[in-house]
Structure formats: structure tokens, C-alpha cells
Image (cartoon, rainbow, N blue to C red):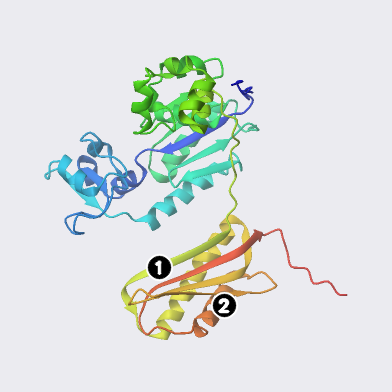
Amino acid sequence: MLELPMKNDTSHKIIHVDMDAFYASIEERDDPRLRSRALVIAHDPRTTGGKGVVTTANYVARQFGVHSAMPANQALRLVPRRLLTFKAPDFTKYRAVSAQIHALFHQVTDLIEPVALDEAYLDVTGNTQFRTTIALGLWLQDQIRQATGLTSSIGLSYNKFLAKEASEYNKPQGRTIILPEQAQEFLDRLPIAAFRGVGAKTAPQLEAMGITDGYTLRQFSQEALITRFGKMGLGLYQHARGVDNRPVLVRTAKSIGKERTYQSVLAAEPAVKRELERLAELVAESLTKKQKHGKTVVLKVRDADFVTQTKRLTQDTYFQGATAIAAAAWQLWQGLDHRPEQVRLLGITLTALDPQQYENIDLQL
């Protein structure tokens, strides 16, 4: 098999920002007493019949082997009860903090690829605000800490793969830069299990082949790795040589919405109308922040029996402001096939979004 030619583009400057134990750190910030506890962000399995998985855990809990995606029951077995605290995730709060952090990202670049609420890639190749990329990265860490009270780890390199490896290298509160001339030495020493994309199933297969680090991986030909692992084999071959030409993908929001679940159900239409007005204000605020507007309003309603209905209204012109959005949502509520007497959840979403510089123009023909 002929080896596919490789081009290694080292012209970009990529930063990977990864918040340190993000959800757990937010809870510790809001309640400092939790810092000395083994904090696990998950529903307590003792109250859910053993169900649930760990969303994340603080560094105290991680010392006992607790990690994300672990069954919550297993965390219960690993950590001494006197130290263990379960806390149900509060994604509304986490999303709000994430929005603060992303607003800081936008101060240095619009080339942002969110990976999750707590991490993102930034292409800062065109940076002219800071003397160096490392100065930019240090500024971001400092601004995030000042704005949110939270710490982050950053990795800087010429591609996404290396930037991610760099941010993982020295957590928490880490900062690692991998220059093109340093990449091969860094990768040769990197344990194979630390390679991005090598999971719990693949690592033993590689180790059985005598591949324990980047150096031993690099001794295998492209053909051998593709034959053994298919498309992933090509990725391993490239990554062992510091090659990753994937661009930072800027994702455009297709919709913006807000919804709320009510512990005490809404049992009267005036209460529903007030809640729709509140949700419309939140949606309008998000649209303003993201400089978007749209032509379709979607209403979501769930009743006390967990039956969900959705209904949408599209108009030729953009909805302008909370009042117009709320009026459309109320119109949709009144047009539901079955208006529930008890409402457990309401949601409003605006779709068919465009940048706010797109305007409605009436042409007189």
C-alpha cells in the first residue's frame, strides 16, 4: 500500500481552553465548604434507586478514582461516606457561567469552536492585540478567573490535536505551549493512553502491539496502522507526527430558546401568560447578546402527565423584542389542540435565525 502524502500546516496559532472541574468548581465557588469534600456532580444514587452517572467530580473525589461518566453507584463505593457529597447538576447556572467565558473569548477572536460548556478551541492566528500568543493565553486565564472566580488550563500550539494535548498536560491551572520544533519530542514521550482518541478499548490493543508511547507508535507504518485500525489508524499515524490539519469550526446557532420546568405546576392561564412573558424576555436578551433575530417562534408545553406538545408560528418579518415574541407564544398557546389544565414545563425557541444586520426591506413593486 502506498503511504498517503502528508502536509503539516504549522502556520496557525490555536489555543485550547479547558475549565478545571468546571461544574464542581462552580459549586465550590458558591459554597466554599464543599472544597474539603469529595464533591460528585450527580443525583445521589441512594435517592434514585441506584440510577444516574457522574457528570464531573472535584479533585478531592478524583483522588479516590471518581471520574466523569462513571455510574454514581460506583462513586458511592469508592469514597468514604464521611467525605462524600452528591450534588444534582444545575445546567442553567453552568450555561450562564459558560456564556460569561465565551464572551471573553469573543474579545480576542470570533474563530471559536465550542466543544462543551467547559472547553473550546480558539484560532488566534490573526491576533494583533497581544505581543505574543502566550501573552494572550495568560490574559484569558486571568480574565476568566476575575470574571467567574474559576481556574482554567490552556494549551497553545499550531493545531487542535496538540493544543488539546497541551491543555491536558499540566491540569489544573496549567499552561503549556508546544512549538512546531518541540512537537516531535513532546509526542515521543507521551504515553499512548494520553493520545487524544485512544480510549479504554484501543489502548490495550496498542499496548499488545508493543506501542506504549508516541515514539513506539511512530515506528509503525501507515499501512500497518490502517490495516489494523482503519480510518483511526491513519489518525494515529498523523498524530504521532504532530499532523492535524482540521480547521477550527465556527458553529452558527440555528436556534435560541429558553424553557423552565415547574416544581409546582401552573394551573391557571394568567400564570401561563406571565411565564411566557418572562421566557420571551430571556430569549430576547439572548438574541441581543448574540446579535441574532428570527422569523419562527416555537412553543413547547408539557403537562402534569408528561405529555409534550410543540407548535410553531412563522412570519415574513423578524420578531422584534420580547413583546412580539411573547405575543406569538401566547397565540400559539391559544391555538393548541389541547390546552392542559396543569403545566409542568414551558419553553420558547426562536429559529430561522439571521445576523441582526439582515433587515426586512419592503420593495414597492
Amino acid type for the residue under numbered disc 1: Arg
Does residue 198 appear left or right of residue 3 in this picture? left
Asked where in the image residue 244 lies, by quadrant, the reply is top right
Q: In this view, does 183 lie above or below 265?
A: above
Q: Position of residue 318 (x, y in %)?
A: 66, 69
Residue visible at 23% across and 39% down in the picture: 61
Q: Position of residue 179 (x, y in %)?
A: 54, 19
Q: Quadrant of the N terminus?
A: top right
* Alpha carbon distance from label 1 to label 2: 18 Å
Q: Position of residue 246 (x, y in %)?
A: 59, 34
Q: Position of residue 323 (x, y in %)?
A: 57, 75
Q: Is residue 156 visible?
A: no
Q: Residue extending furthest right?
A: 365
Q: Is residue 44 above or below residue 171?
A: below
Q: Can residue 87 be seen in this view?
A: yes
Q: Nearer the viewer, residue 360 or 147?
A: 360
Q: Is residue 52 above or below residue 222?
A: below
Residue visible at 57% across and 61% down in the picture: 287
Residue visible at 25% across and 52% down in the picture: 87
Does residue 312 appear left or right of residue 86 in this picture? right
Label 1 packing within 10 angstroms: few (<14), some (14-19), many (20+):
some
Amino acid type for the residue under numbered disc 2: Ala
Label 2 packing within 10 angstroms: few (<14), some (14-19), many (20+):
many
Q: Nearer the viewer, residue 224 or 210?
A: 224
Element type where label 2 sits in the image: helix
Element type where label 1 sits in the image: strand
Query: Which numbered dot is residue 328?
Result: 2
Q: How many labels does the image show?
A: 2
Q: Which of 161 and 58 is in front in this view?
A: 161
The residue where tag 1 is placed is: 260
Residue visible at 51% across and 64% down in the picture: 257
